[in-house]
Structures are given as C-alpha cells and as structure tokens.
Amino acid sequence: GDAMEAVIAAVYLDAGFGAARDLVRRLWADRISAVEDDARDAKTALQEWAQARGMTPPRYEQRARTGPDHAPVFTIAAVLDDGQSAQAQAGSKRQAEQAAAKALLDRLDGAS
C-alpha cells in the first residue's frame, strides 16, 4: 500500500513519468492484463451465457448515433432472445457493444 506508493513516487520524482509507468507495468502487468481481458471479453461471456441456456447469441442494435463526425457517440443495445437487454454509449460501435454486453452481464449476475 503506502510503501509501494512511496516507491513509485520516488521513481517518478527521480526518473520521471516514463520510468514510473514502466515500473508499474513491470510489477502489475499480469493484473493489468487480466482486467483488460475481462473488459475485452464481455461479448464472448454474454454469448457463452446465452448458449449455455439454449438461446441464440445476443444481437447488438444501434439505437442512436450522436455527436459530430469527428467525435461520434454510439448507443448500442445488447438484446437476448427473451427480451432482456441493456444499452451503453461509447465513442466506437465496438466499445459500445462491449459496454452493453458488460452491463447486461452485470444485470444477469445480479438477478441470479
């Protein structure tokens, strides 16, 4: 906790941001990777959840696209056969689909 914070701060003050970032990545690369994998795999996890219950894979519907062309915001809904759905917004369709899948998984986990 506090000791690691002090070490990282000392590296930052002595060698700069790049060195501190490299230290954090070196020490916690496996944990950072696991978090990134969880975020990336929400669509896969939702598909597996649906298939395990005899459902077809979820579909992803674009509900809206707002914002200027250089900074769009997509609203995407993840929808299951039984009508359960969740939607999310992000700056790309792919990110919005992942976020919608995660939101629906979180809701499903809360219901079970």
Image (cartoon, helix red, strand yellow):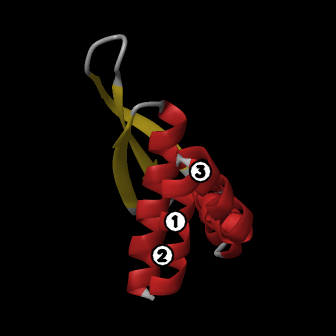
Residue 58 position (above or below residue 74) = below
Residue occupying the point 74% across, 69% down: 30
What label does residue 15 carry, if any? 3
Residue occupying the point 58% across, 56% down: 20
| Nearer-N-terminus badge (3/2) | 2
Residue occupying the point 48% across, 56% down: 13
Label 1's element?
A: helix
Which corner quadrant holds the C terminus? bottom left
Report, in whole angstroms, how far the alpha carbon at label 2 lies from the one at label 1: 6 Å
Residue 47 position (above or below residue 95) = below
The residue labelled by disc 1 is 10
- Residue contact between numbered discs 1 and 3, judged by CB atoms under 8 Å: no
Tag 3: amino acid: Ala
The x, y position of residue 107, in whole percent, is: 39, 73
Q: Quadrant of residue 51?
A: bottom right
Of residues 38 and 55, the one drawn nearer to the viewer in this rendering: 38
What label does residue 6 carry, if any? 2
Tag 1: amino acid: Ala
Q: Residue furthest left?
A: 67
Report, in whole angstroms, how far the alpha carbon at label 1 lies from the one at label 3: 8 Å
Residue occupying the point 59% across, 50% down: 15
- Residue contact between numbered discs 2 and 1, judged by CB atoms under 8 Å: yes
